[in-house]
Every structure is written in C-alpha cells, then in structure tokens.
C-alpha cells in the first residue's frame, strides 16, 4: 500500500470520523506515536505523554502478546488485520476485551511509515454474551432437572432445532443427529402415531395445541408419557412460517393419576350403596301422603332429597370416570337407533324443560342407519350433553338437537346440540374438556355441577373412535358437535388430551 503524506492525513482523518473508538498510530517498531482522546479514556490514562513512546505490546495481556506480535508483523508485510480480539491492559492493571483492526501506511517512496490501529472495547458486549450463555446454561440445567425440553420448527425450510433435553427425552445423544418428523415419530407408541401427526397438522391450522402421548423407550421398551404444547407463527398473509413448542415427561404424574383413579373407583363403589339408600328413602318420604308433617319438615326432606341426588350423581360420575380411565368399563356393542335413544333420554328432562319454558327442537335426518355401540356409553353421551344444555340455558331459551350423517367423514354420524345459553368465556375454552373444570360464568349462574360431564364424553369418544368439538360465544350460546362412527371400536386404553 502506497500513499502520499497528504493522502495519509486524509485517510487518517476519515478513519477517526468513521470509527468513533480509540485510534492509535504506531511506527514500524510498534512504538506508539499518536493517540486520540478515546484511547486515554479506554485505557485509563490521564495524558498523551503517559502513553506516547510506549511499546504498543505493553497494552496487551501476556497471554495474547504472541498473537498480537504475529499480527503486527503481518501488517508490516502489507496485510490488513480486521477484528483481532485480545485482552488489553489498562493503567490500573485491570483487563478489558478489545477488538482491533490495523492497516499499514507508506511514505511517498513506498516505504512502510505507520500502522494505524482502530480499537473497539467489546467488554460490555462480551458481558451481555456471557449473560446470555449463563441464561442458556441455567435453562438447560432446569430442563434437565424437570425432564422438560423445547423445540423449534422452521416450517418453510422444514428444519428442526431441539434443545439437549429434547434429545435426551427421545433417548438420543444431544445434537447427535439432524432431527425431523421421522425422528419424532420413530418410537412414538404405535397407537399414538396417527394422533401425533394429526396434532401437528391441526396445530398449524389452529395456531396452538396441547397433547399427551406415549413414547416407547428403545433402551428398555418401557412406556413413557409426554405432554406437548406448541404455538404457530404466521407471516402477513397468514402462512405458517414457524412453530415452537415444549415437551415434558409426565410419566410420574400419569402413574400417580392411575393410583388416585383406582382409589376413587373403590371409594365410589363403597359410597354408591348407602347414598342410593338415602336417596330412595327421601324420595319415598316425599311421595307418601303421610299426615302430621309440617311444611318445614317437608322442606327439610326436599332439601335432603335434592342433596342426595346431587351426591349420587357426583359419585356415579366419579365412578364412570374411574372405570373409563382404568379400562374397566364394559363394552357391549349392539345395533341402536340414535333418534330413539335420544328421545328416550330426553324424556328424563321433560319436566325441567317445561319448568324453564325452554324451546327444545329435534332435527333428525331421514333414513339414518343404526349405530353399533354400547347402550350405556351412548346414553351417557346424550345425558351429559342434554343436561348441560338445559342447565346452562336461561329460561325461555332455545336448544336444538340435530342428528345426521357427517358429510365430511365416511360412515360417521354427526350429533349437534346448540343452545342460546351463557356460552363459554374465550379465555377458558381450551380447558373445557379437562377434569372437574367449570367455566367461571357457569359456576356463578348454576350451582351443583360436577365439572365431569364433558370430560366423560371425551373419554367415551376416545374409546369409541369418535371426536367432539365446539363453538361458543359468551352470552350468545354454545354448539357441541360430536362425530360418531357407524360402528364404534373399543380401543381399551384411553389417550387423554
């Protein structure tokens, strides 16, 4: 590189303008000949006289001096250096991390004259980077302790990124292989593979999703349960571009749930008999024409009867949930008429419908085939849906029950119950099928619900190959839709989502 002194001065001035960091000028022996004020500030010196005339390598930490000297000699040979990182030494002996770029300037005869070095203090950025690394380390440790992994999927390029714990959850060495959907599905339980595929597809469409599924550990063939949550991000045209999610090992929780379910099953069986007896005797007292009972006594008996009915219903619901979750619910398939079963169940609610002056409409498509399923489970579905619709629809509201053949699924019925009731708050809709959950507005307006009805329906449909979904708007009503196959298939083991 050859420049006239004038060009050298112009370039030096431009350098000062372009790089508002420390500027140092060295002669060919690495002696400092000129500096700017930022150099004093950066290295903690008070005046130019304290630093000019020093050997430039004295500003470098001992462990980095060899690399800096090598770089200096390369610059003397005409090679520019950019972004050389090393530890600098301040006047007080403390260190700072610097990034240096250097260029050689020659005199008019082409002989090496000066080396101009631009120095950036990257200590603050390094501190931020270290903080990020520390946070990443803490996150990795927390994920390892909690058996909690996270992942990201770039949908457009179909590239996945898994944290180390994600690899370990799937019995793989961290970052050992590229990951994709095939790796994800490789050891998913055979009965859950299709469910996981549908979960991914549905999450792209819906924007988020929650799923529990089983994984077969290839090392010992033991079944582990994973809980997955994800969220999809879209571009301005609402095209999916990225999905992020978490994976949590909930095997221990599932095992504890199994123990609790067994306990509830035994307890419910033991409670059923005495409660039924109390309910029957209270009913007999109400129906009898015995003289001598005061109005107050009749009121107490009525309250006793109502309380016993609620308790019996809760006990029956708990027992039903327990039997379904444990896979002990008898399944006796037979040919049944959906409209006939619906009408039979509806008779149990005639009094309540009339009392609340509800307009209950029935719409049945013509030539409906019979369904092959278990009578008790089918009646339970109708009971829970109709009871919910009546309970959460105010007086003089409207409920419409429709049974037809599902146009979007082969050999499938579509059962729909729409009401003009209280609706479900949007913020609570994702919890509606969870055990013991009742929406806040439902609890405020209706006393005595168990929060198990929709959970029971979900379990029954999972056993029978059906599905349930809904639309709802607060203070306008809710529509529950159920898809039921013409021939139900008992799957035995339940998959709770």
Image: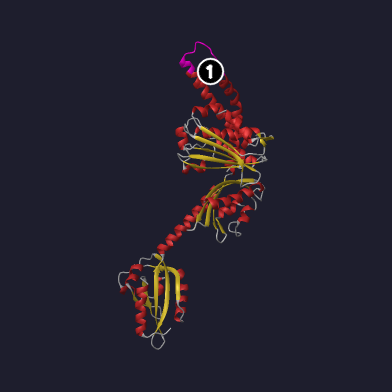
Q: Residue at x 58, y 49 (%)?
A: 199
Residue 335 lies in magenta, yes or no? no
The residue sitting at 59% across, 30% down in the picture is: 345
Q: Is residue 42 found left or right of 304 in the rendered image?
A: left
Residue 295 falls within the magenta-colored stretch = yes
Q: Does residue 460 appear in the picture of this structure?
A: yes
Residue 214 position within the rendered picture, expressed as x and y whole percent measured from the top left: 62, 46
Q: Residues within 10 Å of mark 1 (few under 14, many from 20)?
A: some
- Reading the image, the residue beneath label 1 is 286
Furthest residue toward top:
292
Query: Residue at left 35%, top 80%?
Result: 10
Total marks shown come to 1
- Circle 1: element type: helix
Quadrant for the C terminus in the image: top right
Residue 379 seen in the current view: no
**Residue 159 on image: x %, y %:** 57, 60
Most foreground residue, 68 or 475: 475
* Residue found at the far bottom of this picture: 109
Give the main secondary structure of the magenta stretch: helix
Q: Is residue 369 above or below residue 32?
A: above
In the depicted view, which residue is nearer to us: 10 or 46?
10
| Position of residue 97 measured from the top left corner of the image (x, y, whole percent) | 42, 66
Q: Could you say where residue 91 lies in the image, as x and y percent from the top left?
A: 35, 68
Which region shows up in magenta? 281-298
The quarter of the displayed image where residue 101 is located = bottom left
Q: Which of the image's four quarters has the N terminus?
A: bottom left
Q: Check the image and report above or below for 473 versus 341.
A: below
Left or right, residue 59 beside residue 164: left
Render colour scheme:
secondary structure
């Amino acid at each position: 590189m050859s420049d006239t002194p004038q060009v050298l001065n112009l370039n030096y001035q431009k350098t000062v303008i372009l790089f508002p960091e420390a500027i140092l000028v060295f002669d060919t022996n690495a002696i400092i000949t000129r500096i700017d004020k930022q150099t004093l500030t950066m290295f903690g010196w008070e005046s130019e006289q304290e630093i000019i005339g020093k050997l430039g390598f004295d500003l470098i930490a001992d462990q980095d001096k060899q690399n800096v000297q090598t770089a200096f000699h390369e610059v003397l040979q005409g090679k520019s250096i950019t972004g050389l990182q090393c530890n600098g030494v301040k006047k007080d002996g403390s260190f700072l991390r610097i990034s240096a770029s250097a260029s050689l300037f020659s005199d008019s005869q082409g002989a090496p004259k000066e080396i101009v070095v631009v120095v950036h203090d990257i200590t603050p950025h390094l501190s931020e980077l270290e903080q990020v690394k520390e946070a990443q380390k803490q996150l990795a440790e927390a994920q390892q302790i909690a058996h909690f992994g996270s992942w990201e999927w770039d949908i457009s390029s179909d590239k996945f990124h898994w944290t180390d714990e994600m690899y370990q959850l799937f019995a793989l060495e961290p970052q050992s292989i590229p990951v994709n959907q095939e790796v994800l599905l490789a050891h998913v339980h055979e009965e859950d593979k299709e469910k996981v595929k549908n979960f991914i597809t549905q999450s792209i469409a819906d924007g988020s999703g929650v799923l529990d599924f089983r994984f077969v550990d290839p090392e010992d063939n033991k079944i582990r349960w994973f809980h997955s949550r994800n969220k999809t991000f879209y571009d301005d045209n609402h095209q999916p571009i990225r999905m992020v999610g978490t994976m949590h090992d909930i095997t221990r929780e599932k095992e504890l749930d199994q123990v609790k379910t067994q306990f509830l099953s035994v307890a419910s069986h033991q409670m059923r008999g005495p409660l039924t007896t109390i309910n029957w005797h209270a009913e007999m007292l109400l129906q009898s024409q015995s003289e001598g009972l005061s109005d107050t006594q009749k009121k107490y008996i009525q309250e006793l009867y109502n309380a016993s009915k609620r308790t019996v219903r809760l006990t029956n619901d708990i027992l039903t949930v327990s039997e379904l979750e444990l896979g002990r619910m008898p399944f006796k398939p037979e040919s049944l008429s959906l409209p006939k079963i619906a009408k039979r169940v509806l008779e149990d609610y005639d009094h309540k419908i009339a009392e609340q002056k509800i307009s209950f409409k029935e719409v049945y498509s013509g030539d409906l085939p019979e369904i092959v399923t278990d009578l008790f489970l089918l009646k339970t579905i109708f009971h829970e849906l109709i009871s919910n619709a009546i309970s959460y629809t105010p007086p003089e509201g409207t409920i419409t029950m429709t049974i037809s053949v599902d146009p979007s699924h082969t050999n499938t019925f579509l059962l729909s119950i729409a009401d003009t009731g209280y609706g479900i708050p949007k913020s609570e809709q994702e919890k509606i099928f969870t055990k013991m959950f009742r929406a806040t507005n439902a609890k405020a307006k209706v006393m005595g619900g168990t929060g198990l009805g929709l959970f029971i329906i979900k379990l029954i449909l999972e056993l029978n190959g059906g599905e349930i979904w809904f639309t709802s708007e607060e203070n306008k009503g809710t529509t529950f839709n159920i898809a039921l196959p013409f021939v139900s298939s008992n799957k035995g083991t339940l998959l709770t989502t």
